[in-house]
Amino acid sequence: MTIRNTAGPAAHQAVALRVDSDRSAFFRVAIEGHQDTLYAHSLRQFYRDCRISGTVDFVFGNGIAVIQRTTISTLPLAAGQTAGSVTAQGRRDPNQNTGFSLHACVVEAKYPTYLGRPWKPFSRVVVMESYLGAGVQARGWLEWDNGDDELATLFYGEYRNYGPGANVDGRVRWPGYHVIMDAAVAARFTVRRFLNGLAWLPSTGITFTADLNRK
């Protein structure tokens, strides 16, 4: 199945799919657009063996989402844009259990991109055990347009990624950015822990990995 918004990169926000339902699961679905392709708006969501493409903030929202073994494909940018961004997570409060976990994905990054930027003050994204292509910028992450107020309150983490874009030596030095070294910390963002997935994903019949690939 393919879900596509055909608006081009110059059209600005053009959502292809918005998800608001708890215990949503997508398997082998292509979600295609440019800016703001997938609006993971709220509640628990799981994506497996999918393909998500876009340019700017193309996975955004305030859901609790695990994106697993999925290809994240960056597309050519609009005129005047120098780099895109994969995620724009919108966690508003530190007590919210929301965030995005990209687990065992392939971030192709054929075009320059950042892994994410903080849409809201407590934005939370973890990228773990994933391949990061050469187009992932050395800094890894980008400030939001209006400055750096979120940099101490967000939580961005990377755990055991690999590939030409995975070197963390040049990453941002924000208070809220973490190179995760402890498997116990990374495990908080797995299907088992982050989604409580063992309670509902088996009934979907979709293949999933409950835990980290390497501990």
Image: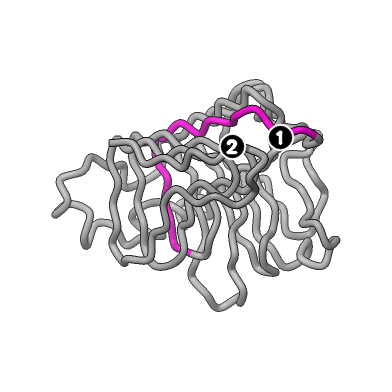
The residue positioned 35% from the left and 51% from the top of the image is 46
Of residues 126 and 111, the one drawn nearer to the viewer in this rendering: 111
Q: Amino acid at mark 1?
A: Ala
Residue 28 image offset from top left, x and y in percent: 29, 35
- Residue 178, compared with residue 152, is above or below; it is above
Residue 8 marker = 2
Residue 186 marker = none
The residue positioned 51% from the left and 34% from the top of the image is 72
- Residue 27, compared with residue 65, is above or below; it is above
Residue 43 image offset from top left, x and y in percent: 39, 67
Q: Quadrant of residue 148?
A: bottom right
Of residues 138 and 76, the one drawn nearer to the viewer in this rendering: 76
Q: Which residue is mark 1?
A: 78
Residue 157 image offset from top left, x and y in percent: 63, 49
Is residue 93 left or right of 105 when viewed as pictured? right
- Residue 133, compared with residue 50, is above or below; it is above
Q: Amino acid at mark 2?
A: Gly
Measured in 3D between alpha carbons, the distance from the residue under mark 1 to the one under mark 2, in whole angstroms, is 8 Å
The residue positioned 43% from the left and 67% from the top of the image is 42
Q: Quadrant of the N terminus?
A: top left
Task: Give the colour scheme shown.
Answer: one colour
- Residue 49, compared with residue 120, is above or below; it is above
The residue positioned 22% from the left and 54% from the top of the image is 201
Q: Label 2: state its secondary structure.
A: loop
Q: Point out the stretch of residues depicted in magenta.
A: 63-79
Residue 52 image offset from top left, x and y in percent: 46, 37
Is residue 189 left or right of 175 when viewed as pictured? left
Query: Circles 1 and 2: CB distance less than 8 Å?
Result: yes
Residue 181 visible in the snapshot: no
Residue 153 visible in the snapshot: yes
Residue lying farthest right? 147
